[in-house]
Image: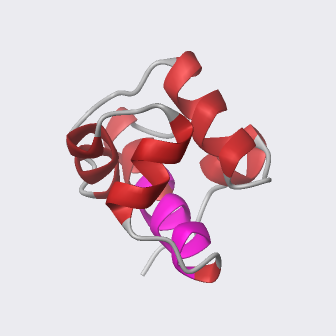
Amino acid sequence: MNKKTLEEVRLDLAMNLKAIRAEKGLAQERLALDAGVDRTVVSKIERAKTNPSLDVLLRLANHLDTTLARLLKANKPL
């Protein structure tokens, strides 16, 4: 079993959120406003600087029409 650190999970989330947001053509501010989340929270998530609540993750996933699993999907190491 591959054990991940909190930092690794944060980095996966950061990369995935940024990529999905870019696929949808949304700016951080637009995503935050439409999902009912503060823009600084979106920025901190994308910089792997915060541990968002499940509520925030679910709001973002729902607005991006994706799943929590996709937001948290492990990325391959560099």
- Residue 24: percent from the left, percent from the top? 64, 75
At horizontal 52% and vertical 79% (from top left) the residue drawn is 22
Name the foreground residue: 12 vs 26.
Answer: 26
Residue 49 in which image quadrant: top left
At horizontal 28% and vertical 38% (from top left) the residue drawn is 41
Q: Is residue 47 above or below residue 49?
A: below
Is 65 on the left-hand or right-hand side of 49? right
How was the colour assigned to the protein in this rendering? Answer: secondary structure
Is 15 on the left-hand or right-hand side of 41? right
Does any portion of residue 1 appear in the rendered image?
Answer: no
Q: Which residues are magenta?
A: 13-22
Count of marks overlaid on the render = 0
Q: Is residue 60 above or below residue 73?
A: above
Name the foreground residue: 39 vs 46.
Answer: 39
User: Where, quadrant-wise, is the N terminus in this rendering?
Assistant: top right
User: Where, quadrant-wise, is the C terminus in this rendering?
Assistant: bottom left
Name the foreground residue: 29 vs 56.
Answer: 29
- Residue 63: percent from the left, percent from the top? 68, 46
Majority secondary structure in the magenta region:
helix
Is 78 on the left-hand or right-hand side of 69? left
At horizontal 79% and vertical 53% (from top left) the residue drawn is 65
Residue 7 in which image quadrant: top left
- Residue 4: percent from the left, percent from the top? 50, 40
Residue 10 in which image quadrant: top left
Does any portion of residue 6 appear in the rendered image?
Answer: yes
Residue 44 within the segment the image draws in magenta: no
